[in-house]
Image (tube, grey):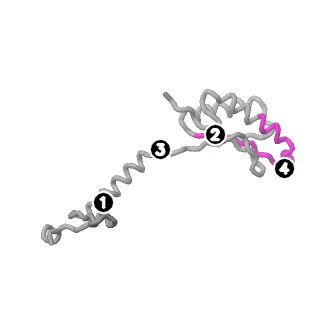
Amino acid sequence: MLADEQGLDLVEISPKAKPPVCKIMDYKKFLYEQKKREKTLKSKATKVIIKEIRFGPQTDDHDYEFKKKHAEKFLQDGAKLKAFVFFKGRSIIFKEQGQILLLRLAQDLEEFGKVEQMPKLEGKRMIMFIAPKKVK
């Protein structure tokens, strides 16, 4: 056969075609290049970074402002923000305060990011996601 004479492999490219398509090539080199291509594609893919900011239902203004500055920085760096209010013990009775706090944060960060998921109560946590706005 031609492939044996050249010291290469006969590789079936598309078995469903009539007649099946085959190619004479070095199969090991083909696999190596395919892995290399996949690796470069994987390295170019954007990695989503999620940063978390935790509040209590009675977070005071100074702490709120401090955490808001960190949230701005995270969004400007292109990371997603997961803001959550953690209710300890019986503080779950303050869920409205937690929701108001998260909505206030969303409003304050409007120029840096948009709300991806509105505040939602999951167990003892009220969670909200904010995605960064695309930088032009």
Q: Amino acid at mark 4?
A: Gly
| Residue 46: mark | 3
Name the element at disc 4.
Answer: helix
Mark toward the start of the polypeptide (1 vs 2): 1
Residue 30: x and y, percent? 28, 60
Name the residue rendered at 14%, 67% in the picture. Answer: 6
The amino acid sitting under disc 1 is Tyr
Q: Is residue 70 left or right of residue 28?
A: right
**16 or 70, nearer to the observer:** 16
* Crowding at mark 3 (Cα within 10 Å: few <14, some 14-19, many 20+): few
- Quote the CA–CA distance across marks 2 and 4: 28 Å
Residue position marked by numbered label 4 in the rendering = 89
Q: Is residue 36 magenta?
A: no
Tell which tag, 2 or 4, sits nearer the viewer: 2
Q: Are marks 3 and 2 in contact (CB under 8 Å)?
A: no
Range of magenta residues:
80-100
Q: Residue furthest front?
A: 18
Rounded to the nearest angstrom, the CA distance separating label 4 from label 1 is 57 Å
| Dot 3: element | loop
| Element assignment for label 1 | helix
Q: Quadrant of residue 79?
A: top right
Q: Which residue is mark 2?
A: 116
Nearer to the camera, 82 or 22: 22
* Mark 1 lies on residue: 32
